[in-house]
Image: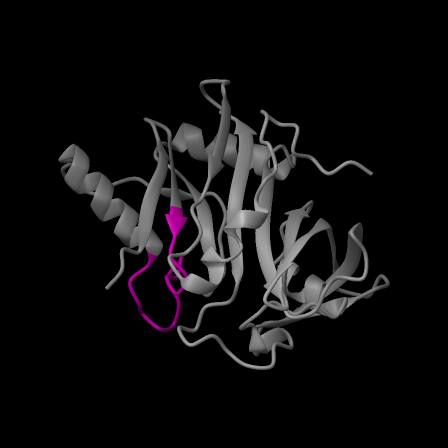
Amino acid sequence: MRKPFDVIYEDNHLIIVNKRAGVIVHADKTGDKTLEDYVKEYIKEKYNKPGDVFLGTVHRLDRPVSGLIVFARTSKGLERMNELFRKRDVQKTYWAISKRKPPEKKAKLTHWLVKDHAKNVVTAYDHEVEGGQKAELYYRYVGTVNKFHLIEVEPITGRPHQIRVQLASMGCSIRGDIKYGADKPNRDGSINLHSRRIYFVHPVKKEPVLCRAALPEEPFWEEFLALDNEEIKDDTMKFLY
């Protein structure tokens, strides 16, 4: 089996990993081994730690999604990273591949999302609805390869299934995501959504942290590497409108 994750950044307070699609972050009814379990095992073995290993989950990715996940190795790190996420002082950038080209070169999407917990499906409305959570993101069309289109997404909010359902609502379902309108699943059960970059100021060291996750080792993804020609300079990746 391929490795469930690769370590991208690590210090005394944080560990950031590149998750393989198909690995679940938190325990669920399937009982499958989680990313938390794998990372705890890694820390325990590397540092020869006795007893239980502390690991705080700062945010999540859906099971079929790959890319960057931040964990805290200390309670101080967890508390302060949670505060950064709450204040939206963390910039996340995703890559999504769709069969349909977005209607504009770049734009902001705003919806109100309602989740059906029984079916684990989210519905997006373009107007405020009772029980709906406001969801916002920026997207930018990057380019086309073999009739598929690469869309770069920067979410402003962090709602369940947000990118998947918001892109689907403008007709750009993510490749393989049959839950939100794709015509067929990917062979390995993944969807072509990847948490590509993350930027924040370290909550303890007060130093900039910029991480970038390699694309999944899959020929379809690799065809899009040539489109990634954007220069990365500190925190200047914010979309400008």
Direction from residue 178 to residue 10 in the image, left or right: left
Residue 26 position, x and y percent, is: 40, 58
Q: Looking at this rendering, what residue extends furthest in the top direction? A: 206
Quarter containing the N terminus: bottom left
Which SS does the magenta portion mostly show? loop
- The residue located at (54%, 48%) in the rendering is 226
Q: Which corner quadrant holds the C terminus?
A: top right
- State the image quarter where residue 181 is shown: bottom right
How was this image coloured? one colour
Residue 240: percent from left, percent from top: 78, 36
Would you say residue 216 is visible in this rendering?
A: yes
Any magenta on residue 239? no
Between 76 and 170, the residue placed more toward the observer is 170
Q: Position of residue 176 (x, y in %)?
A: 53, 73
Q: Going 54% across and 59% down the picture, which residue do you hit?
A: 193
Q: Is residue 161 visible?
A: no
Q: Where 241 sits versus 27, above or below?
A: above
The image shows a total of numbered marks equal to 0
Q: Which residues are magenta?
A: 18-34
Q: Nearer the viewer, residue 148 or 212?
A: 148
Q: Residue furthest right?
A: 127
Q: Is residue 224 toward the left or the right of residue 188 in the image?
A: right
**To which quarter of the image does residue 131 belong?**
bottom right
Residue at figure coordinates x 44%, y 46% from the top left = 69
Along the viewing direction, whichever of 174 and 33 lies nearer the viewer:
174
Horizontal and vertical percent position of residue 234: 58, 24
Depth order, front residue of 207/55: 207
Image quarter for residue 103?
bottom right
* Residue found at x 47% / y 64%: 220
